Image (cartoon, rainbow, N blue to C red):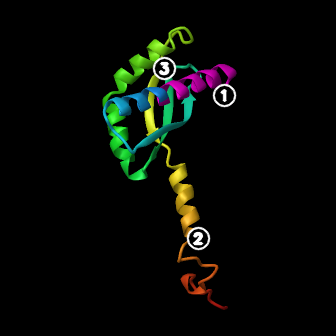
Amino acid sequence: METNRQKKIAGVLQRDVADVIQLALREAGVHGILVSVTKVNVTTDLSLAKVYMSIFPHKEGETVLKEVNAVKSQIKHQIAQRTKNQLRRMPELSYFIDDSLEYISNLEEAVKGKENPIHDRDLLERRKKK
């Protein structure tokens, strides 16, 4: 169960990490990639924060994650500057890809798609009668 302090810090980090990453992408001249921070989980001792990012288009996810991890210390420094009045100690940040939107999209396509087992019963394996 998350404490109110954990939730507050997670909210602050979520907003600031998203801002810093979007600004870094703009400054690098990268266009057509949208990065949003979907969730931040902070440990009870406030020393670690897991940052989950949703990246569009999905195929750019691994590339963006590698770039973010390469400049991890600069991102942490910029966020520490922004949050110096709210946090005594800046948590260590770990970045992950949140693929839940891609998963939902794949489910929708499976239901809408040509291979819909509701309409085409031949896609399902036949049950053996005993």
Where does the magenta region start and end? 1-18
Q: Is residue 4 magenta?
A: yes
Residue 108 horizontal/vertical position (percent): 58, 63
**SS of the residue under disc 3:** loop
> Which quadrant does the C terminus fall into?
bottom right
Q: Earlier in the sequence, mark 1 or mark 2?
A: 1
Residue type beneath disc 1: Glu
Q: Quadrant of residue 39?
A: top right
Residue type beneath disc 2: Lys
| Foreground residue among 123 and 26 | 26
Q: Earlier in the sequence, mark 1 or mark 3?
A: 1
| Foreground residue among 2 and 11 | 11
Q: Are dots 1 and 3 in contact, CB under 8 Å?
A: no
The numbered mark at residue 112 is 2
Q: Earlier in the sequence, mark 3 or mark 2?
A: 3
> Which quadrant does the N terminus fall into?
top right
Q: Quadrant of residue 69?
A: top left
Q: Are dots 1 and 2 in contact, CB under 8 Å?
A: no
Going by the image, does 106 lie left or right of 22? right
Going by the image, does 21 lie left or right of 127? left
Q: Identify the residue shown where x is 36% and y is 27%.
A: 72
